[in-house]
Amino acid sequence: MVQFKPRQGPKLPAPPAPMEAPRNLEAPEIAPAAVLIDGRSARATGRTKQLATRVREEFYDEVKQYAALHRLKVVEVLELGFQALKQKS
């Protein structure tokens, strides 16, 4: 059987007496009054499908630069380009 060494380090304080302990377990649960919207859901775009492909390095660099200059996401640049292609034909 394995022999363990006794715990080293500072001792823990004694637990509080039952009368001093908080009564939070007896309190009713109260739901938050206001619905908080976190940053992730505020930025939600509805895009749920992944589209992955390989492209030339020059094309990738151009798309990234265009997106950065126009403060767009790369996917938004691709969506705008596809819309323009559909309108053209």
Image (cartoon, rainbow, N blue to C red):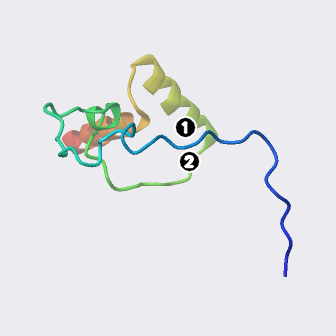
Quarter of the image where one finds residue 76: top left
Quarter of the image where one finds residue 75: top left
Q: Position of residue 72 (x, y in %)?
A: 38, 26
User: Residue 12, labelled with which disc?
Assistant: none
Residue that badge 1 annotates: 59
Quarter of the image where one finds residue 30: top left
Q: Out of 39 and 28, give the one closest to the viewer.
A: 28
Q: Position of residue 82 (x, y in %)?
A: 30, 43
Category of crowding for the residue at label 1, using alpha-carbon neighbours closer than 10 angstroms: few (below 14), some (14–19), many (at least 20): few
Q: Position of residue 85 (x, y in %)?
A: 28, 42
The residue sitting at 83% across, 66% down in the picture is 4
Residue that badge 2 annotates: 55
Name the residue type under label 2.
Answer: Val
Q: Residue furthest top?
A: 69
Task: In the rendered view, tell whether residue 3 sits above or below residue 49.
Answer: below
Task: In the rendered view, tell whether residue 81 sits above or below residue 1.
Answer: above
Tell me: 19 left or right of 46: right
Q: Residue furthest bottom?
A: 1
How far apart in space, not on screen, are marks 1 and 2 (Cα)?
Answer: 7 Å
Q: Quadrant of the C terminus?
A: top left
| Secondary structure under the numbered disc 1 in the rendered image | helix
Name the residue type under label 1.
Answer: Phe
The residue sitting at 17% across, 41% down in the picture is 31
Tell me: 39 left or right of 66: left
The number of callouts visible is 2
The residue sitting at 23% across, 39% down in the picture is 88
The residue sitting at 25% across, 40% down in the picture is 83
Category of crowding for the residue at label 2, using alpha-carbon neighbours closer than 10 angstroms: few (below 14), some (14–19), many (at least 20): few
Q: Position of residue 18 (x, y in %)?
A: 39, 45
Q: Out of 43 and 36, give the one closest to the viewer.
A: 36
Tell me: 11 left or right of 57: right
Instruction: Look at the numbered discs 1 and 2 and tell me whether their residues touch, using CB distance below 8 Å.
Output: yes
